[in-house]
Amino acid sequence: MAVTAWLAIVAVGVGTFCLRASFLYLYERIDLSPRAERALELVPAAVLAALVAPALLAPDGTVAVVGNDRLLAGAAAVVVAWRTEDVLATIVVGMAVLLGLRWLPTLVGLV
C-alpha cells in the first residue's frame, strides 16, 4: 500500500514538472503574436490582483467596506506605490497605516 502511494506521489510530481517545463520549452520555440506577448506580460499583475483583492475586500469571508482596516491600508499603499514606485515605501506605509488603525481604538481609549 505504501509503495503505491509513493509511486502516485512521484508520478504526480513528474507530471507536474513536465507540464510546467513544457511551457518554458515551447515558449522558446513558438513565435507569438504581439497581442499574445502583451497578454502574457499582464499575467503576473492579474495573479497578484486576484490574490490581494480578496484579502483587502473580504478579510473575514464577506465583503466589508465600512470598518475595514485592511482596505484603508491597501488604499494608502496604492497611493504610495503610484506616487513613489518604491516597493519598500509601499510596504512600510501600508503596514504603518494598518497597525495605526488597529491601535487607534486603544490609543483613543487611553486619552
Image (cartoon, rainbow, N blue to C red):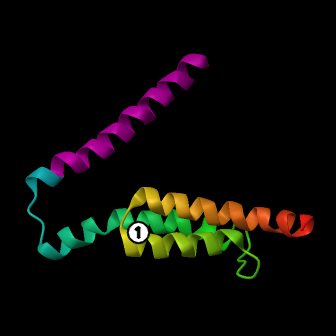
Say if the magenta span includes residue 6.
yes
In terms of secondary structure, what is the magenta stretch mainly? helix
- 94 sits left or right of 30 in the view: right
- 21 sits left or right of 66 in the view: left
Q: Residue at x 40, y 75 (%)?
A: 82
Residue range highlighted in magenta: 1-26
What residue is pinned by disc 1? 46
Q: From what the image shows, is residue 105 above or below residue 13?
A: below
- 4 sits left or right of 14 in the view: right
Q: Residue at x 49, y 29 (%)?
A: 9
Q: Position of residue 13 (x, y in %)?
A: 42, 33
Quadrant in the picture for residue 57 = bottom right
The amino acid sitting under disc 1 is Ala
Q: From what the image shows, is residue 3 above or below residue 62?
A: above
- Depth check: 58 or 84 in front? 84
Q: Determine if residue 60 is in view.
A: no
- 2 sits left or right of 27 in the view: right
